[in-house]
Image: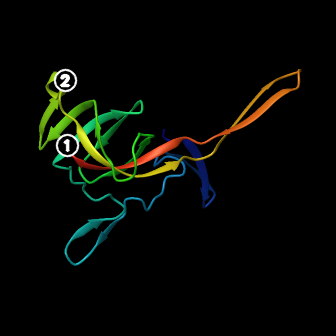
Amino acid sequence: MLRTSVAHRTIAGVRLRRTSLERPRGADPNRSRVTRQAQGTVRENEPEERQEPAVYAVISTGGKQYRVEPGQQLTVEKLVGDIGDSVDLRPVMVVDDAGAVTTGGELAGRSVSATITGHERGQHLRVFTYKNKSRQRKRRGHRQHHTIIRIEEI
């Protein structure tokens, strides 16, 4: 949203009126500053181009969906198994193999294999319930169990 304000200046006794529509309030004027170097023009503060992985899949575990690729390590809801055990994650929603996207019934037998690298507990949550005017108060805490896995192959 652009800021529209009126600024008044006085130069040599003449009142000047200027409407500012330059940039939103709080915008950083140096954000996309262009600098010159020996090789040419370089734009600062811009993200580098990101390479898309050759193979990725979308899996569902613990009621959530994750986009995974081989070698990736991620934290999911607790899975049964010891550290070092291999698990097969199903169902697989989407598989993209270098631009060839596979979805639906073609993925009926496919799975993603992963290795359990650790178990941990999540951040401590404080749960407080009360009923007003009756002095009913209850304070509890909760920490969710998580499993850290490393994706081996799709």
Estimate the x, y position of residue 153 in percent, counting from the top left: 20, 47
Label 1: how many Cα within 10 Å (few below 14, some 14–19, many 20+) = many
Asked where in the image residue 59 lies, by quadrant, the reply is top left
How many numbered dots are placed on residues in this image? 2
Estimate the x, y position of residue 83 in percent, counting from the top left: 39, 52
Estimate the x, y position of residue 116 in percent, counting from the top left: 36, 49
User: In this rendering, would 82 be left or right of 120?
Assistant: left
Residue, x 24% and y 68% (percent of image)? 41
Q: Amino acid at mark 1?
A: Ile
Residue, x 34% and y 64% (percent of image)? 44
User: In this rendering, would 88 be left or right of 145?
Assistant: left
Q: Residue 15 has which mark?
A: none
Label 2: how many Cα within 10 Å (few below 14, some 14–19, many 20+) = few
Callout 2: SS: helix
Residue, x 33% and y 49% (percent of image)? 85
Estimate the x, y position of residue 82 in percent, counting from the top left: 40, 48
Closer-to-camera residue (31/152): 152
Name the colouring of the figure. Answer: rainbow
Q: Label 1, label 2: how many angstroms apart (C-alpha)? A: 16 Å
Residue at mark 2: 104
Asked where in the image residue 51 lies, by quadrant, the reply is bottom left
Residue, x 25% and y 30% (percent of image)? 93
Residue at mark 1: 154
Q: Amino acid at mark 2?
A: Gly
Q: Do the residues bearing badges 1 and 2 touch, measured as CB atoms within 8 Å?
A: no
